Amino acid sequence: MKDKLADLKARLAEVADLESARAVLSWDQATYMPPGGALSRARQMATLEKLAHQKFTDPAIGELLDELQSWQSSLDYDSDQAGLLRATRRKYEKAAKVPADFMAQLTEHTSASFETWSKARPANDFNAVKPYLEKTLELSRQLANFFPGYQHIADPLIDFADYGMKAQTLRQIFANLRKELVPLVQAITQAAPANDTCLKNNFPIDLQRQFNRDIIRRFGYDFNRGRLDKTHHPFTITFSIDDVPITTRYSDQNLCDALFSTVHEAGHGMYEQNIKKGFEATPLATGTSSGVHESQSRLWENLVGRSRPFWNFFFPRLQQTFSEQLASVELDDFYRAINKVQPSINRVSADEVTYNLHVMIRFDLELALLEGNLNVADLPDAWRERYQLDLGVEPPDYKDGVLQDVHWFHGTIGGAFQGYTLGNILAAQFFAVATSVHPEINDEISQGEFGTLFSWLKENIYQHGSKFTADELVPRVTGSPLSIESYVSYLREKFGQLYKID
Ligand code: ZN
């Protein structure tokens, strides 16, 4: 059995190496590659992807998994080997059902679609992307249909990102959350609005960079095994457990943009950097689901980074860094400004309270598209109507309406948005447990210390990588399955105080 396990691990390591090499090319494409390199780079990445897919779906891997099956059932469920075999089988069975030709077609189509969207968005041209989006919808349906027996056609697509999650379950969770959010947004919009003019000034980018780097170093993001670069769209990418770069974007007119996106990506980065070393180059060496991953970025961004204790420590430093711009600003006013709630047309810059309403709009629209209840041609109108209905605002154009997010233009329709809201819910659920086990965490945060929180996250979440599924991990860590309770009480308490509502 030892030999078979070693054989399996050697094969998985080759797949992981090809995937990492592809990731390095993709990171470089987004950071330093000159524009002229785009065509050859796309070809090189497609070659590596094809090789990785071929190696991973080699029937020999399936045979090894079968031969190791009886040994696997003799192992302790919590052992690393059992976890490795479970995760590998899950991933293998999924990959093996999708023909390599289809994968190649999908990759080729999504690159072309992304290319078109990149130009169509600034030009405000929905018609240019419409045929691509129609094709994406068709391919998304085809992909789902490689997994027959689903309840909802979106289920297999959701399953790629959030294993085990179903459209029906998500609809229920989102409906329950919506019932809490809508009255809260209404109460806030009737209260005195927060003033955020102090955030709109000139903030030199070099100073922002130094300040943000200092924050995430204190959190525990390891610059010896990571780096921070500049891109249009912030992201985290993994080359190895010991090499997890993150990126951010800067605006000299907006202090919060880089600050919170750096903190957000550092949350993703710390998760990947702190997976158990022994999981390197296996399917265990990554976060377990998009919802759990997002919970880690949101936890550091919102529950820590937008909290009052955090700014008790960092605001005097921020004032020192930007002495001219912030000299006459009070901590309380700054805290209110960074937590201003205002229904808007933009998801990425949305506040904590309205954010999930943006996600729900996208989720409902993509289900309607997949079900065949909405045509691509009618999508822009449907988008506008939902924004008017849910948020009371209407995008003035396609650019900041239906063309706003990259997801549908750079991947399938279905499966890409639910993770954001699951992440918000789980962040609050995890943080509530961490602070009840270690009530000193908030005092530490107000002194710029994050060691207790970081260690708790590492011990309970980070180190496990993909060893446990989200459905297994959440009850292990919190004692109950995913639940919106902690999140709703967190929002009520924080924004109730800020906006003086009961
Ligand atoms: Zn994220």
Image: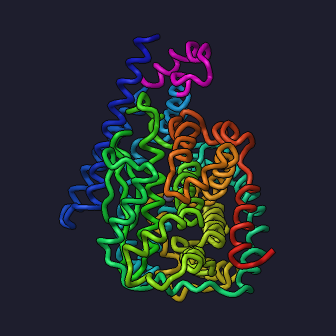
- The x and y percentages for residue 83 are 55, 27
Q: How many marks?
A: 0
Q: Is residue 414 visible?
A: no
- Asked if 211 appears above or below 41 in the picture, the reply is below
Q: State left or right for residue 288 relative to residue 2.
A: right
Which range is magenta? 60-83
Quarter-wise, where is residue 106 in the image? bottom left
Quarter-wise, where is residue 185 in the image? bottom right
Q: Please, which colouring scheme is shown?
A: rainbow
Q: State left or right for residue 409 relative to residue 159.
A: left
Residue closer to the observer: 406 or 340? 340
- The x and y percentages for residue 216 are 42, 56
Residue for point 24% across, 50% down:
44
Quadrant of the image containing the C terminus: bottom right
- The x and y percentages for residue 324 are 38, 84
Q: Is residue 427 magenta?
A: no
- Asked if 156 appears above or below 230 in the picture, the reply is above
Residue for point 76% across, 63% down:
175
Quarter-wise, where is residue 248 in the image? bottom left
Residue for point 70% across, 42% down:
478
Q: State left or right for residue 132 relative to residue 252.
A: right
Q: Is residue 478 visible?
A: yes
* Magenta stretch secondary structure, dominant: helix
- Asked if 73 appears above or below 161 in the picture, the reply is above
- The x and y percentages for residue 174 are 72, 61
